[in-house]
Amino acid sequence: MNRLHPLSAAAYALQYGFLWLSVASILTLLLGGIFDAIESAWVSLAAPVGLVAGAAYGIAYYYRFEYGITPDTFDVASGVLARRSREIPYERIQNVDVRQGVFQRLLGLAVVSIETAGGGSTEAALNFVSESEATRLQHQIRTRTAEVKDRRRGRGRPDASAADERSPATDEASSDAETERTSAATDPDEPAPDDDGPTAEPDSTDGTTTSDSDPVSDGRDRVAGPDSRGPRREQLFALEARELLLYSFTSFRPAAAAALLGLFFFATDLAIDLLVSAARPFGGPANLGEGSPTSYGILTVVSVVNGVVTAYVLSVVYTFAAYYDFRLGRAGGDFVYERGLLQRYSGSIPVEKVQSVTVTANPLQRLIGYAGLWVETAGYGPESDSGGSQSAVPLADQGRVHRFTETLTGVESPRFRSPPTTALRRYLARYAIVAALVVAAAFAVAQFTPLERWYLAAVVFVAVPPAAYLKYVNLGYYVGEGHLVVRRGFWKRKTTVIPYYRIQTVSTRRTVFQRRLGLASLVVDTASSRSFFWTSPTIYDVDLKDARDVHGTGRKRLQTALRERARADDSGLTIDFT
Amino acid sequence: MEALHPRIRLFWIAKGAIGAIALGVVLAAVDQWVTDVPTAAIAAVVLLGLGLGIAYAVQLYRVWQYEVQSDALYLERGVLTFVETSVPFVRVQHVDTQFGPIERALGLSSVVVYTAGSRNADVRIPGLTPDRARDLQDTLRKLAVESEADDGV
């Protein structure tokens, strides 16, 4: 079993020291206020005691936290008083992520998180290990996973040629693993001797794989970069400067607005001062509290503009920093990616854990002919910032992204079918109701404020037909040979490719209104991460008969695909998709 | 297609009644502390809630159906939104039988089927007799084990 990096002892000591210090101080002050026997002045004694006790706890936590790599599982044992030991089988690991903040990069540290499907949070988080240890772990887990898979295949497949071809390599690999495990215990940094054997193996079943001499080798791989020591890492995609800038300027993150709002509540006075002084040159009030209705109106308008611009700038800066130097590569059967300017992220996703693939584009990106490609796995908990999907290609030319998608999944070029025009009627009615609500709200406001001419709000009705039309034209679905393709959304158009063999459940849903029009929505559920924002792919508002047809087709093809997969043992995804 | 046990209507009516009574208590509290609410209005709201609850329970019972088909568990349910769901046996992670206090008093039990999906991840069939629930659980478990080892995650 290994320990974390010694510096994490200092980090835990600091963290728990300050936590306990504040708890001790607050408790003393609180109890001092309630009971006469306790003096508030004891704080000067309680605080250092809390600090020392907390630091001691932090150090104990470090010594009681152990992790290790065994042939079949990744083990973590932790806890000072209450112990928990956890074993994670390799074939269940979904993602291995490495995160490095600014200070951690300066000190050469990294946080490793290991995710499996299910469960609310990260299954194993190592705070912190050294950079080289993080790389070693990522690589070791990958190698072991491939080994386990090979062993299982060797067992599960009676047909002789494949088994014979494999078993020597597997035996060798597992005996290597045995000897290496003992050596790993003494020297955690020793590189694995069986780098290329088993990891290269899974591809041999795949006819389309390029040979090892052919691929574009990653010339830019830095010395300390992940996988410099692992199996040969081939670059699949790198975000160019032009694409990075386009991506930064064309994406809008609601999180930026939320952050701005948070900042506003944190420093309200300063923010209001700034807003008032920004509006003054345009005719805003000289001070808050002495102004005419017109100047307040100007202040409101200028402040809104200010807020929107600031949120946009924040969003651009965040996107730029987060996706700076984005690179996607492959190592064995895994996608490996890294990105980030200040905080570095890197991670690996086994290609066979990919549940579905989504192409996204907002209106601006569609205007300039660009799109992004995301892959969904079942690993992430609800707290992950990416909402359960990982970017494979943040932004690239639309044609390229479509080509990538087709190579990755093997889906044919989809010929989308549209919902019937009765669906359009539904959206017209829906948005008309929304517009009516807006007018009603304006009317209500007019009752309590000097605002007149509330009926001018009726202008929103003009937006109803275009809104309904835009919603309608962006809907589409395609029932392919091996995949279902679902397209929806105007503001963030998502085109999701779902292989039939990834379907978990299928539901046909009809609300009261849909039943009246003979329409139905089909929800195709896959094992993606649970998230609030990323809803299950849904084919909206198609004729009931079509919905039932697709429902049945999905079910039937799932069974066929499962039978075929059991025979061919092929994940259906091509890792060299670019 | 198989329907649920008729007694499930009592369970749903009981749930509706609890909701209606809770609403009545809230209204009584408003009457006491905030503003006057006529007692007749409170009674009317509670009665209306009860009536809606009964109608809803009766209608829900009429539409609720399920069937163990060749490759999947198939269910139909829903009053306002009518939902037809297929849960392929291959995707079943585990199967529970559960019952709460009211169900227990009525001698009913539920089967809950879990998948690895994100939405509809747990599918519940309420209103089964305990024997039927255990029977269904066994059937589903056997079918899930037979169908495939690969759970797709």
Image: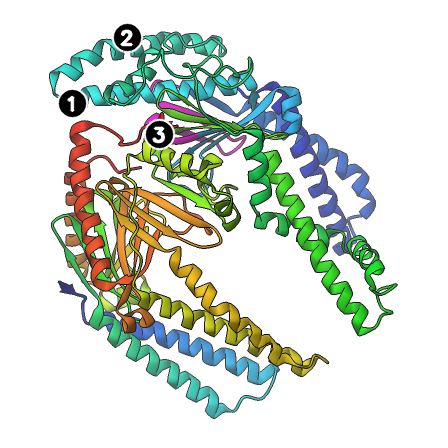
- Picture quadrant where residue B77 is located: bottom left
Can residue B150 be found in the magenta stretch?
no
Residue found at x 47% / y 42%: A369
Residue type indicated by callout 1: Arg
Q: How packed is label 2: few (under 14 Cα within 10 Å), some, or many (20 or more)?
A: some
Q: Which mark is residue A53?
A: none
SS class, disc 3: helix
Residue found at x 44% / y 44%: A360
Residue type indicated by callout 3: Val
Residue found at x 66% / y 22%: A106
Q: Residue A456 location in percent, x, y? A: 61, 77
Q: Residue A540 location in percent, x, y? A: 33, 59
Q: What residue did someone put label 3 on? A: A351
Q: What residue did someone put label 2 on? A: A172
B149 lies left or right of A497: left
**Same chain assignment for discs 1 and 2:** yes
Q: What residue did someone put label 1 on? A: A157
B111 lies left or right of B1: right
Residue A167 versus residue B74 in the image, above or below: above
Closer mark to the observer between disc 3 and disc 2: 3
Q: CA distance from mark 3 to mark 2?
A: 25 Å
Q: Which residues are magenta?
A: A71-95
Please tell me which residue lies in front, A379 or A450. Answer: A450
**Same chain assignment for discs 1 and 3:** yes
**Same chain assignment for discs 3 and 2:** yes
Q: CA distance from mark 1 to mark 2?
A: 19 Å
The chain containing the residue under callout 2 comes to: A
Mark sitting earlier along the chain (1/3):
1
Residue found at x 34% / y 39%: A355
Q: Residue A479 location in percent, x, y? A: 24, 48
Please tell me which residue lies in front, A442 or A528. Answer: A442
Q: CA distance from mark 1 to mark 3?
A: 21 Å
